[in-house]
Amino acid sequence: MSLLVVGLSHRSAPVSVLERASLTAEAQAKLLQDTLASEPAVEAAVLATCNRIELYADVDKFHAGVAELSTLLAQHSGVGLEELTPYLYVHYEDRAVHHLLSVACGLDSMVVGEGQILGQIKDALALGQELHTAGRLLNDLFQQALRVGKRAHSETGIDRAGQSLVTFGLEQLALGSGMSVGEWAAGKRALVIGAGSMSSLAAATLVRTGVAEVVVANRTQARAERLAEILGETGGVARAVPMADVARELTRVDVVVSCTGATGLVLTAENVARALGVTADHATAAASAVSRGADGAGTDAAAGCPVIADPAGAGEAGAGAGAGAGAGAGAGAGAGAGAGGAVVPAARQGADAGSMEQHGAWADNGTAVAQPRTRERAGVPNGAPVRLALLDLAMPRDIDAGVHRLDGVRLVDIESLAEASADAPMAADVDQVRTIVSDEVAAFGAAQRAAQITPTVVALRSMAADVVTNEVARLEGRLPGLDDKQRAEITQTVRRVVDKLLHAPTVRVKQLASEPGGAGYADALRELFDLDPQTVAAVSRADLNDTPDGGNRGRA
């Protein structure tokens, strides 16, 4: 096993970089295909959410793999390698397994313990299977991650820490009002822009908190109407409007939640200022430097706001882990590494990890590389009463960052949620989940090491069976008078002898091979019994063709 992951997340990179590096579905597919076509990689999978881009690969050369995967991420994200490198982290072999299992359990999410990441991991695996880039290693790894994530949620109370990102966002909007979210939301009118998974979760959450009305706006009118219908069936008051009516609805609502797949800003500072009847000059000057155009406004499902099966479940809008356990190496210029640790940019080597830790979701032996944020926290200027509360859960952002400078406007976005989550207390169940992760990492490593020796054992038994067959045939030539009963008894006896001789050593060698450093036992077995390497390879290929996903085997 030579598992390698190179990635960046909201812990290792500022939102401005993540916005530019976000990958469309088409870009993800092309990234996987190009990764498999590269020399070091034989399998590949990409986990891309609103706030996380991670490229997993089975590589035969570590340093070449890091360099190639880093270059591919830069090429497909559109962010130059020199600029991207300081924000990349690297995990290798068991450390990479530990990282993904921690992510699956929600330990590295913006809101600790949230569950939507499991759906995102499932989608990543499905894409790799569809494109035939995920082979046995990545299939096993991602399936294991899904099982471990479900186990963590069923056996611990991590869900108590894993509130929905939407709920967390609403709490931040209500902060300072002196009221609970329910009290704050009661009687308010809300506009939800988008009808994809995260927007649907937001709408359902708003209904549960007691808003008077939810208005759904979406580019695809039918989807907006369907969501409004579902909300109505659950007891809420909801209606659908076309995207063209958003400006009018802004003048009527108190709360706006937006999460679309738009490539441009859905709400500019001018839009909001016009709706409130205030000047937008100072807000425009403070607007985000990210130029996104307005062409894609209103797309109903963002690549970074992936589908979730349970609208009542928690949601990671791409919350990620920018640091964790991992064998590291420089991912390009300006990056340094230490043995057994994640990549740490040269500018930040030697920094106190504790001072940079953002909240208690860090993996046990992780190395923090997150940069302190300096952006002004979202709020209402001069203590003015809040006339319009905006929650932007999209990546890239839907709402102009400059709106938070408008009088009477409060904006909470992914970046401010990341800042707020840094102060969140660690749940007592996190330690229990970490123990589960550590145990499962050990079990996965043992299973993978044992699986590597299986073709050799099968080839040995096949060779023994051939010896039995040949010797029985030779015996028949020398003793032609044997009847069928005698011949069968002799054959069975010889087979029993061979099986008994092979049983103990083959069982023992599997046990030894499953332990750390046990890879050499397969080589020893091949040498001792003079097994044909081609025969062993043929067994491996046959075993690989029997994978339950129907032949998603990575590069041959």
Image: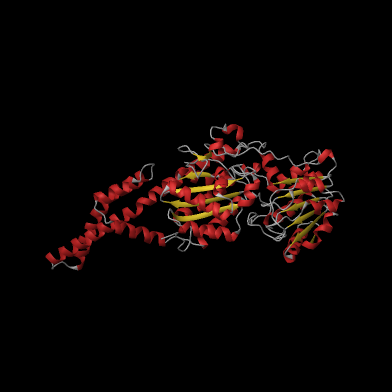
Residue 358 is left or right of residue 184, and the answer is left
Q: Is residue 238 left or right of residue 339?
A: right
Residue 347 location, quadrant: top right
Using residue 50 as the reference point, say whether residue 333 is left or right of it.
left
> Is 32 drawn above or below residue 94 in the view shown?
below
Q: Residue furthest left?
A: 478
Viewer-proximal residue among 243 and 437: 243
Q: Which of 88/457 is in front?
A: 88
Residue 459 visible here:
yes
Given residues 435 and 487, the one toward you in this image is 435
Report the front residue among 53 and 291. 291
Provide residue 534's location: percent of width, then percent of height: 30, 59
Quadrant for residue 224, please give it.
Answer: bottom right
Residue at 33 percent of width and 58 percent of height? 537
Picture coordinates of residue 421 (x, y %)?
67, 40
In the figure, is residue 408 to the left or right of 81? Answer: right
* Residue 180, position as x, y percentages in the image: 78, 41
* Residue 367 appears in the rendering: no
Colour scheme shown: secondary structure
Among all residues in the image, which is located at the extreme right? 277
Residue 509, relative to residue 127: is it above or below? above
Tell me how many marks there are.
0
| Quadrant (top left/top right/bottom left/bottom right) for the C terminus | bottom left
Give the image location of residue 85, x and y in percent.
54, 45
